Every structure is written in structure tokens, then in C-alpha cells.
Amino acid sequence: MNEYPFELRKISLNGKSRQQLVTFLESFHLNFDDDVQEAIGIFISAQNSKTESSQQFGENDLIACGGCSGHVIKCIAIREEFQNTGLLSKIISYFYSRMKKSGIQNILIYTKPEQSEKFINLGFNAIVKTENVALLESESDGISRYVEKIRERLPAEINEFGCIVMNANPFTNGHQYLVDTASRQCRHLLIFPVKEDRSVFPYDVRLQLIKENIRPYENISLLDGSDYIISAASFPTYFLKENSDISRIQAELDLTLFGSRIAAPLRITQRFVGTEPYDLMTAGYNAQMKKILPMYGVQPIIIPRLEIEGKAVSASQIRKMLYENDFSSIEKFVPPATYHFLISDEAIPIIQKIKQKML
């Protein structure tokens, strides 16, 4: 008979239940990520809470927990006394089953490097590891298949490619200038759109605007977004120390993954970015890029940001103009395809969302 019969329960993300989860994670020096969509707790079942081996735990005491957000399993913690009782497998199995039923194909786990072997033993596969973070996926060849799919689309006669990783929230004249400049500095340019739907402009809209605005260029390939371009918005931080430089750690992981698993097999030798006068996080990312990508044979090329009327053009500037209904100014800062979208009925819900967020 199992010495510890367990009961798995959903944990409400509101009120006392949420606080119980936050306090439990804090006891392991872990943080609760605010984007968790579902959480579970594991408790000793009521009828066994008085056994000799578990009498120090009540039936409402958490002994393990886990959470998920989108395609990422996170916020996992298990009391030391129960480390070898199969609870990690129970937590992973629960979310794996739920995610697969919802149509998620590839499930990701970010963890401390020293913990990665536990997830590998449960069938996950290591993608990349840095000093602070390991990233694993449920598919055995997920990133390899992604890269091979891209390679099949590329012109075989070209040996080296340039690239841009672009969020385009929305696509501005600044993006147009970066694309135009980069396309003239390499034989063929690859554009990787950020897939994560954390931006106010949804992924399908951003992808369509990029596509329309790069249509005249014959030496550009717009690729599908993927989970392998890690945005700061989606990067889990629950397992990092409180005073960690989170933006630096996220940049290191993203750039190491890009350099080692994407750029190298696709023969990418240049990555173009614009200068960043406003956002310190993006400026820090660019600094990390100059340090990390050359180790993988990729030269970071920093293009001076386009200025109009003495102002560096940025997507955040356009969102601010949308909030202020300043469409006469917007027309100067975005290409025609973007402007036509912004004045269309399709843009109304997005503009309303911007106004709600900026209130």
C-alpha cells in the first residue's frame, strides 16, 4: 500500500487559495508568475493525514504544486519529504494531458540547469542550457523539425543569410527602414516574427502587416513565428533569485538558443537590429547580442533608428498616437499598408484595447 496516498486539487487563483500558493512557493525561494492560468496542488488525502509518516501535515497543507501558462508548465515545487514519491510525474502528467487535449503540440519547461535531468527522465528533451536556465520541450525533435522546415524554403544557391527578429507592434516606417537597409546589406534576408500573443496587436495581424509591407522585396523570406523566439513577456521568472538580472538572463537564453540551434544550421551570419534610444531592456538585449552571437558566427549589425521630425520612430509612439486619436501624425510615421489597416474597422477592437490599457 502506498505510504502517502495523495489528493490532487485545482487551486483557485483568487483570494486565500492564491495566497496559500504564493506562500508555499516562497518557502522554496520561488516566485509566483502572474500569468499562470491554472494551478494545482497536491495534498495528503484526508483519511491518511493522521498516519505516523504524515501526521505533521494536515489535509489542507500543500505538499506540492504546479501551474501552467499557454504552452509552458511552471511554478513547480515539492516538499523535500515527498521528493521521491512520484509527485513530479503526477504534476507533469496532469498538465501534459490538459494541454494536449486543448491542441497544444509542443510543451515547454524552463527550469534551473541542475533540475533539468528530472524532466528529461520524464520524457522531455533539452533544447538549450545557460548558466542560469535550461529550456526543455516535449517533442523529441521539435526544434530540429522547425529548422528543417525553414531550410526547405530557402534558396539553395545562397550560402549565407541575414536576419531580423521583429515584433512589429505595429509595423512602422522604422521597421520599413530597417528592412530596406538590411535587404541591401545581405544577399537574402530572413524575417522571424515574434509569435507570442502578448502584444496589443495580435500575431496574425502583425504577420499580415509585415507581409504586406515587405511585398516589393524579392530577396526577403518571411518565416512562421515559433516558440523558439523567446520574448521577455513570456519568459518565466519564478525560479530565479529575487535580485537576478532577469532581462539579462532572458536575453542570454534567447540568444544562445538562436545562435546555437537556429542561426548555425541555417547559415545565418548577420542579425540586424535598430538602435534603441528609449527602452533600456531592449538596449540591454542589444548589448548581450554583441557579446553572444559572434560566438556562433553571427555578426550583429546595429542600424541607426529612423528619425522623423527629430523623433526616433517607434511602435510605442504609434500606440500612444492611437490612444490620442492623432491619425494625422500616424500617417507620417507608418507605411501605407499599416495606415490603411489602422483606419479600418478591423483595427477598432485593438485601438479600444490600447485605450483601456493606457487609462
Image (cartoon, rainbow, N blue to C red):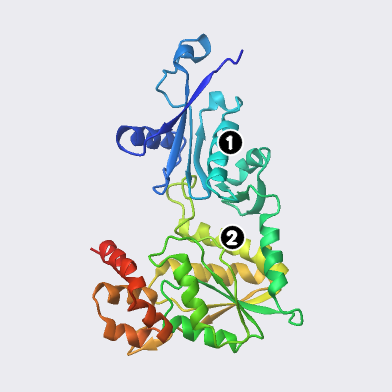
Q: Where, quadrant-wise, is the N terminus in this rendering? A: top right
- Image coords of residue 198 (percent x, y): 42, 60
91, 340: nearer the viewer: 340
Compared to 337, does 15 lie above or below? above
Q: Where does residue 109 sit, x and y in percent of width and height? A: 57, 47
Q: Quadrant of residue 340?
A: bottom left
Q: Residue at (57%, 37%) from the top-left corner?
A: 92
Q: Quadrant of the C terminus?
A: bottom left
Q: Position of residue 203 (x, y in %)?
A: 47, 66
| Residue behind mark 2 | 228
Q: Which residue is mark 1?
A: 93
Identify the secondary structure beneath mark 1.
Answer: helix
> In the image, which disc is placed on residue 250?
none
Task: Name the residue rendered at 41%, 64% in the picture.
Answer: 199
Tell me: residue 303, above or below residue 94: below
Residue 112: image location, x then y, percent:
57, 45
Q: Secondary structure at mark 2?
A: loop
Residue 50 visible in this rendered orientation of the protein: yes
Disc 1 residue type (three-letter): Ser
Task: Mark 1: give few (<14), some (14-19) or many (20+) Cα within 10 Å.
Answer: few
Between 272 and 69, which is closer to the camera in this rendering?
A: 69
